[in-house]
Image: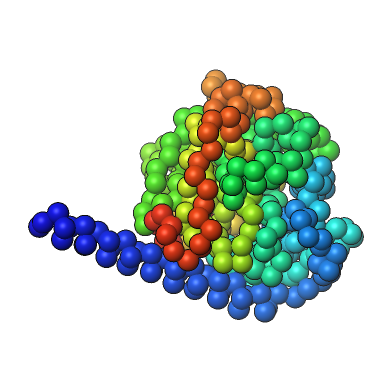
């Protein structure tokens, strides 16, 4: 094959992939529109959202124990309005959220798994309300921290990102755990998360790039060490893109692990990336995890292929000890920077994402991945 014909074949292949990804994005946007029509508003206060407000989007089910710290943390960071979908909670979460004056609440009784693990619900709200806002999209068990977060709020952070022409920020999901067996915590229930679950694995973490979307897949940490050591490629994906200046044409593909247009996946390369990034302190292993894992064996809502993760949930239900000699105690964001788990952005910024979200974007990742958190 001549050089010229090879280049032509390459251009045609790239054009075909770009075409497929555009239609994938449009399909997911249509899913969000259809799903949004089935959301039941319980308390719609979105008329109070102001231009430039920082918004938070989430779907929850039975998170009453986490919600007070969750809301307090993100209010401290400067979130001005919360947009939450409640997946038919029965533990008091709904009633608690209805009392929050800076929060709009919808209910869905649809299946979490068949709505792409809640991303169709969240996508509907992002489409309606997120355009041109800086949007935080997280789970109720994730608390975002970043360099100087205790002194500089999200308005300061997003101004810095805007000044660098950067449309978003990535983060490592860091699993915190107790020294005691699962089902217990290292402090009382009213203590801060990092006292109840003060330990984590500093590594190893590894990053691969999946095609054709170019999304990153970071794996490693405590769950791989304890539950997936013999099959590390089945371990949970730990990189996320939780903070994005939203455009109505954007859509999350696999939880907040990846996005379309595909160029947005270039925002974060995982641990060791010197660009400005954060850490999501992950409270999965609070004491109720044992009970929830037993429940998940019956509900089968958190994985594309639930049968392949039965052993994982059974292992959690057995309440193992995750702590080992290499565990580190969490000491704050400076420790995260020193360990290379968080970047400060002091190196030159990456090229800005092109303004044309329809064309000219890098390729990126595997479709249909399990939401394996």
Which picture quadrant has residue 100?
bottom right
Looking at the image, which residue is at 57% across and 67% down? 249
Looking at the image, which residue is at 81% across and 42% down? 76
| Residue closer to the observer: 236 or 75 | 75
The spot of residue 288 in percent (x, y) is 70, 46
User: For this view, does 27 lie left or right of residue 193?
Assistant: left
The spot of residue 92 in percent (x, y) is 82, 59
Q: Is residue 132 above or below residue 269?
A: below
Quarter of the rendering occupied by the N terminus: bottom left
Looking at the image, which residue is at 60% across and 42% down? 164
- The answer to whether residue 218 is seen in the rendering is yes
- The answer to whether residue 284 is seen in the rendering is no
The spot of residue 227 in percent (x, y) is 48, 40
| Residue closer to the observer: 249 or 89 | 249
Looking at the image, which residue is at 50% across and 72% down? 26
The spot of residue 244 in percent (x, y) is 62, 52
Q: Residue furthest left?
A: 1
Q: Is residue 87 above or below residue 366?
A: below
């Amino acid at each position: 094959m001549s050089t010229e014909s090879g280049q032509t074949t390459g251009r045609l292949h790239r054009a075909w992939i770009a075409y497929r990804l555009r239609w994938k994005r449009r399909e997911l946007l249509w899913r969000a529109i259809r799903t949004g029509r089935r959301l039941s508003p319980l308390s719609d206060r979105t008329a109070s959202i102001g231009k430039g407000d920082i918004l938070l989007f989430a779907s929850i089910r039975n998170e009453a124990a986490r919600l007070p710290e969750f809301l307090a943390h993100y209010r401290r960071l400067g979130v001005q309005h919360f947009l939450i979908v409640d997946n038919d909670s029965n533990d008091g979460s709904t009633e608690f959220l209805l009392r929050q004056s800076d929060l709009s609440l919808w209910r869905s009784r649809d299946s979490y798994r068949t709505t792409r693990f809640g991303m169709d619900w969240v996508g509907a709200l992002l489409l309606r309300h997120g355009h041109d806002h800086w949007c935080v999209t997280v789970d109720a068990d994730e608390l975002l921290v970043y360099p100087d977060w205790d002194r500089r709020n999200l308005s300061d952070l997003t101004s810095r990102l805007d000044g660098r022409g950067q449309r978003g920020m990535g983060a490592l999901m860091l699993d915190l755990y107790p020294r005691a067996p699962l089902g217990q915590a290292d402090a009382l229930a009213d203590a801060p998360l990092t006292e109840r679950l003060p330990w984590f694995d500093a590594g190893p973490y590894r990053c691969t790039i999946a095609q054709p979307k170019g999304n990153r897949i970071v794996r490693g940490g405590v769950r791989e060490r304890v539950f997936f050591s013999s099959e590390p490629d089945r371990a949970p994906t730990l990189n996320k893109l939780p903070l994005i200046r939203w455009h109505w044409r954007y859509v999350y593909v696999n939880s907040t692990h990846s996005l379309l247009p595909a160029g947005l996946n270039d925002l974060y390369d995982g641990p060791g990336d010197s660009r400005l990034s954060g850490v999501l302190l992950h409270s999965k292993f609070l004491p109720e995890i044992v009970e929830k894992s037993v429940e998940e064996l019956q509900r089968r809502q958190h994985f594309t292929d639930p049968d392949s993760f039965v052993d994982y949930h059974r292992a959690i239900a057995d309440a193992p000890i995750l702590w080992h000699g290499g565990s580190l105690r969490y000491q704050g964001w400076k420790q995260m920077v020193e360990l290379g788990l968080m970047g400060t952005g002091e190196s030159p910024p990456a090229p800005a994402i092109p303004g044309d979200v329809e064309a000219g974007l890098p390729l990126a990742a595997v479709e249909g991945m399990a939401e394996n958190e």
